[in-house]
Image (cartoon, rainbow, N blue to C red):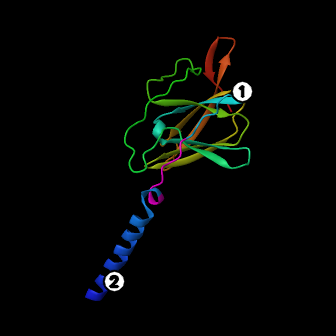
Amino acid sequence: MDINKELRILKKIAMLFSIILLAGCSYVFPVPTKYEPPRNTSDIAKVRLMGNPLYYSIRQKNDTGDLVGGFVVEHNRFVNIGLGTTVDSGFPKIQGKDYSGKYFETLVIADRKTEINYLAQNCSVTLGVIPKRDATYEVHYSDSDLTGYCVLYIRPVVFDEVNSIYIEGSN
């Protein structure tokens, strides 16, 4: 390889590195936004995100029509290792279902376009939903239902008055 060509490549690399340094880490690695659940409102729905909470994010349309939100668990701008922790807010649970794994319970504003995202190393999927007021939902992902794809499922948690238990409803 020609020495001049190698020098030009090194100069380009040095220039790129300088730009990154001058721009700062906040430009190259911005702090990920965190989802803030609604406060002091009666127009809410409950959402339980099953699995690793570190991989979930929620965005909802605000009053101006923009989708706002972020990850449900605070993220580091560089590396995120771990499984996050279970957040149990006391939402109704489906009778007989195993809740020993990780999950995250949060509130969303009802009757608004909502995007629930799951972003892991080999899986990126978005589910659009408009949650109903006072409803409880369970969201879970699967990377084995469809070969080569990951899928998010959402099901309402409903009260069965005949048996006096909570069950998984249909959409």
Q: Give the residue drawn at x 49%, y 38%.
A: 73
Viewer-nearest residue: 6 or 171: 6
Kindly report the distance in space between the C-alpha atoms of the residues bearing marks 2 and 1.
63 Å
**Image position of 169 with respect to 150: above or below:** above
Q: Residues within 10 Å of mark 2 (few under 14, many from 20)?
A: few
Q: Position of residue 88 (x, y in %)?
A: 51, 24
Decide if residue 98 is on the left or right side of residue 3.
right
Q: Earlier in the sequence, mark 2 or mark 1?
A: 2
Res 2 visible: no
Q: What residue is pinned by disc 1?
A: 42
Q: Is residue 86 visible?
A: yes
The residue lying at 55 percent from left, 47 percent from top is 125
Instruction: Using the image, determine if residue 105 lies above or below residue 147.
Output: above
Residue plotted at (72% across, 31% down): 132
For label 1, the crowd category at 10 Å Cα-Cα, with few meaning under 14, some 14 to 19 and many 20 or more, is few
Residue that label 2 marks: 8
> Taking 71 as reference, is 44 left or right?
right
> Hey, what amino acid is under mark 2?
Arg
Mark 1 belongs to which amino acid? Ser
Splitting the image into 4 quarters, where does residue 37 fall? top right
